[in-house]
Amino acid sequence: MRGLMMGRFQPFHLGHLELVKQILKECDEVIIAITSSQFNYLEKDPFTAGERIEMIHNSLLDEKIDLSKCFLVSLENQFNIATWASYLKSALPDFDKVYSGNDYVSMLLADSGISVVNPSLLNRGIYNATKIRSMIISDDSWKELVPNAVSEILVKINAKNRLEVISKSDTKPTEH
């Protein structure tokens, strides 16, 4: 059995990592689909798909999660919501169920006959990527909310500076 989790992972945090572990307890394999892969250097999506893949891959390695049980894929957003479920089925390896705490996503997938599991999530008030991005600008306390591998990558790419520049910029590329 194969479970699917989807997210922007901007950045990948400990809540995401716990969900990977939960899925692997219930399924033989997990597909981690990085959505909005075409967006980067934006306030809502500051990190590239490649950076996010590296964050997740390195986090899984550090946790000694068997990578042969994990598929990491990136997906561009689809703008025809009615065909989104069929797009997922064609763009991803076969999956048996989707793990999602997003009611909208759950509705869309269930309407297309896809089995959806509402996972038990770590405290979403704490493990929240929007909050973590704000914390990266203001202090170092964000580091305790992400895996060490993610912290290392964010420091390496100078995420603090990137987020500061993006947040102050009057250039607002087309948001999604």
Image (spheres, helix red, strand yellow):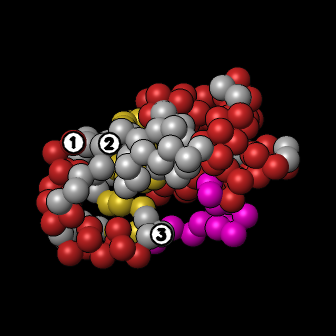
Name the residue rendered at 21%, 64% in the picture.
81
User: Position of 91 compared to 166: left or right?
Assistant: left
Give the quadrant of the C terminus.
bottom left
* Residues at marks 1 and 3, CA–CA distance in whole angstroms: 22 Å
* Residues at marks 3 and 2, CA–CA distance in whole angstroms: 19 Å
Q: Secondary structure at mark 2?
A: loop
The answer to whether residue 21 is visible is: no
> Which residue is label 1 attached to?
91
Magenta-drawn segment: 118-130
Mark 1: amino acid: Ala
Nearest-to-viewer mark from 3 and 2: 2
Measured as percent of width and height from the top left, residue 100 is found at 43, 65
The relative height of residue 78 versus residue 123 in the rendered view (above or below) is: above
Is residue 23 found inside the magenta-colored segment of the image? no
Measured as percent of width and height from the top left, residue 145 is found at 75, 50
Measured as percent of width and height from the top left, residue 90 is found at 16, 45
Would you say the magenta stretch is mainly helix, strand or loop?
Answer: loop
Specify the label residue 154 is tagged with.
none
> Which residue is label 3 attached to?
101
Measured as percent of width and height from the top left, residue 11 is found at 60, 45
User: Position of 84 compared to 2: left or right?
Assistant: left
Mark 3: amino acid: Gly
Mark 2 vs 1: CB contact within 8 A: yes
Name the residue rendered at 36%, 39% in the picture.
38
Nearest-to-viewer mark from 2 and 1: 2
